[in-house]
Image (cartoon, rainbow, N blue to C red):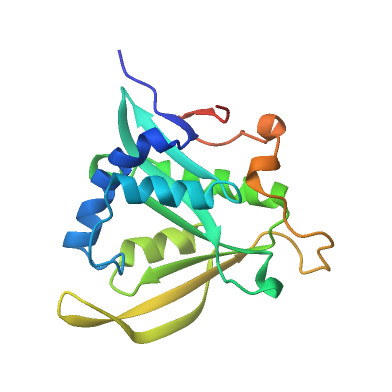
Amino acid sequence: MKQTTLIRFAAESDAAAMADLYRPYVLETVYTFEYEPPDGTAFAGRLRRTQPDFPWLAAERDGQLLGYAYASRAFERAAYGWDADLSVYLRPEAQGCGLGRTFYALLERMLVCQGYQVVYGLVTGENEGSCRFHEALGYRLTATLPDCGFKHGRWLAVHWYEKRLCPPVPPGQPPRPASEMDWTGLDLSGLGPFAVKLGF
């Protein structure tokens, strides 16, 4: 019987599996600019720092973590408070099945509910697959930063993708923290062949 892929909120108990999934990205690719792979303890710390304000999602099938995605603060100063940055990491066997698209669709819907207006994706210039992914999802290339990162013996460019979630109108109140949201009414339609359970 085919197992269903479940998308849910990430928990600190996922930290070690997240670290294991992320390690090859750090050591073998230029898709992340980290040099040293963080361990499970470091990932648990990242979750604790970020989750009160932004959603972290995990996908699992038959007890194995297939991928994770999260939103985070794009910039620190107050006027940028309506902007967020998105990231997604998948195991190789989980790529090409629509999971990344579903992660992004969920995060975008959640950020709209929180009150965010603009989301960004920063992509290493050599990561052509991620460039195509963002463009297919309606992200617009707004800037290229040439030779701004050095890894694996070469200089690397970064492409800055942007997507506006709602019209640029005065936003009123700052976005609500994720920890204060009630996600029971979130639109879960059109998310592909995945089970979604947004609750603890």
Please identify the quadrant where the C terminus is shown.
top right
Task: Name the spot of residue 121 as percent of width and height, x first.
Answer: 48, 65
Classify 151 as above or below 17.
below
Picture mark count: 0
Horizontal arrangement in the rendering, residue 90 relative to residue 88 (left or right): left
Residue 75 visible at all: yes
Residue at image point 19% right, 82% down = 154
Residue at image point 45% right, 37% down = 10
Residue at image point 64% right, 42% down = 179
Horizontal arrangement in the rendering, residue 30 relative to residue 49 (left or right): left
User: Which quarter of the figure has residue 193?
Assistant: top left
Classify 122 as above or below 114.
below
Foreground pick, 23 / 143: 23
Residue at image point 46% right, 47% down = 47
Task: Name the spot of residue 168 as percent of width and height, x first.
Answer: 77, 69
Classify 174 as above or below 146.
above
Horizontal arrangement in the rendering, residue 100 relative to residue 93 (left or right): right
Residue sitting farthest toward the bottom: 146
Foreground pick, 44 / 95: 44
Foreground pick, 95 / 87: 87
Residue 102 visible at all: no
Please identify the quadrant where the N terminus is shown.
top left
Task: Name the spot of residue 185 as percent of width and height, x first.
Answer: 72, 31
Task: Name the spot of residue 88 as percent of width and height, x first.
Answer: 41, 52
